[in-house]
Each structure stands twice: as structure tokens, then as C-alpha cells.
């Protein structure tokens, strides 16, 4: 009996690394010269998960977002999994923005991945959607590795992670 090989396709961010990056960004915003005397805040909501940025004006908000991106990059948090919301300018020119964090593959992206694998000509590979992740199975490891290469070459708007290769 031939054994089935499989791997999981998922996406997500490490919330502890995001928390560390937010703390580093807060520290830098307190010490940077262009933020002196301003009220710029960064709040991390683990339940959302989201990050709320608020600054005195739109220019400082973009600077604050740049600091946050830099710290997230240094902590190996994939920037593809960050969903930047619209900038809202409120009273007295204060600007706010909510940055969402993507954990899990949404249904539309999952269907696109399944369609791309089927269109790739892999006859023995089966891809199943299991909630917010996918599982690819095949009797051949070589075909599964070819599927990985195909998926790495395409852009789905999220950073794909491959795990549980058995």
C-alpha cells in the first residue's frame, strides 16, 4: 500500500513578535527628534488582532507607520500579512489609522490556491480546505515539492507558510 505524503499551507503572524515590535516602535517614537513634543501613540490589541496608530497630523502618522514597519521587518513579521486601513483625519487635524493583522487564509484566497494547483497540471495532488489552512496530499513527495515551488512563485496577498511535511 502506497503511503500518502502531505503538507499544510497556512499563514499568520507571531503575536509575541508583533508585541515586541510595537514596544520597540513606541520607544523609538519617544526618543526621535521629529516626534518631540507630539502626542503619537501606538496601541496593540491582541484580540483583534490589530494595531491602532494616532498622531498629531497625517505626516507624523506616515512617519510612525514607517517606524512600525521597520520594527516589524526586523522581528521577521511578514509585511504581507499586515492590512493597513484608511487614514482618518479627525478634529484638530489628528490622524488615526488601524493596521489589521492577518492570521489564517480567507476562503477566497484558499479557493484561488486550490484552482491554481489544479491548473498547474498536478494529477495526483489533492488540496483540501480545512478552516483557515489547506492540506495538500499526494503519493509523491516530488509533486508536493513542485506544488510548493508553484505557490511560492505566485502572490496571494499573504505570506504562505508550509508545515507538517510528512
Image (tube, rainbow, N blue to C red):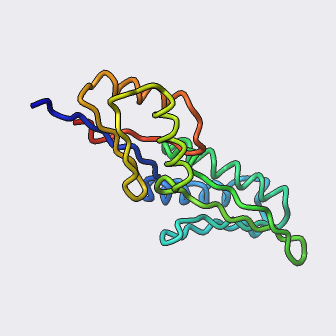
Q: Residue at x 85, y 69 (%)?
A: 89
Q: Residue at x 56, y 52 (%)?
A: 108
Q: Residue at x 62, y 44 (%)?
A: 70
Residue 58: percent from left, percent from top: 84, 60
Q: Is residue 42 left or right of residue 62?
A: left
Q: Is residue 126 left or right of residue 139?
A: right
The residue furthest right is 92
Residue 50: percent from left, percent from top: 58, 65
Q: Is residue 117 left or right of residue 30?
A: left
The residue furthest bottom is 91
Give the quarter of the image for residue 91: bottom right
Quarter occupied by the N terminus: top left
Q: Is residue 50 above or below residue 105?
A: below
Q: Nearer the viewer, residue 42 or 5?
A: 5
Q: Nearer the viewer, residue 1 or 97?
A: 1
Q: Is residue 159 left or right of residue 35?
A: left
Q: Residue at x 27, y 37 (%)?
A: 6
Amino acid at each position: 500500500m502506497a503511503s500518502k505524503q502531505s503538507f499544510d499551507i497556512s499563514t499568520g503572524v507571531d503575536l509575541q513578535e508583533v508585541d515586541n515590535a510595537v514596544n520597540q516602535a513606541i520607544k523609538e517614537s519617544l526618543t526621535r527628534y521629529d516626534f518631540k513634543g507630539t502626542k503619537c501613540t501606538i496601541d496593540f490589541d491582541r484580540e483583534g488582532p490589530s494595531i491602532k496608530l494616532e498622531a498629531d497630523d497625517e505626516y507624523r502618522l506616515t512617519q510612525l507607520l514607517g517606524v512600525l514597519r521597520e520594527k516589524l521587518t526586523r522581528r521577521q513579521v511578514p509585511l504581507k500579512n499586515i492590512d493597513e486601513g484608511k487614514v482618518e483625519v479627525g478634529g484638530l487635524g489628528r490622524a488615526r489609522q488601524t493596521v489589521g493583522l492577518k492570521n489564517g487564509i480567507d476562503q477566497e484566497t484558499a479557493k484561488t490556491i486550490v484552482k491554481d494547483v489544479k491548473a498547474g497540471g498536478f494529477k495526483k495532488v489533492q488540496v483540501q480546505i480545512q478552516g483557515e489552512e489547506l492540506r495538500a496530499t499526494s503519493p509523491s513527495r516530488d509533486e508536493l515539492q513542485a506544488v510548493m515551488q508553484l505557490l511560492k512563485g505566485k502572490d496571494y496577498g499573504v505570506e504562505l507558510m508550509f508545515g507538517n511535511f510528512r
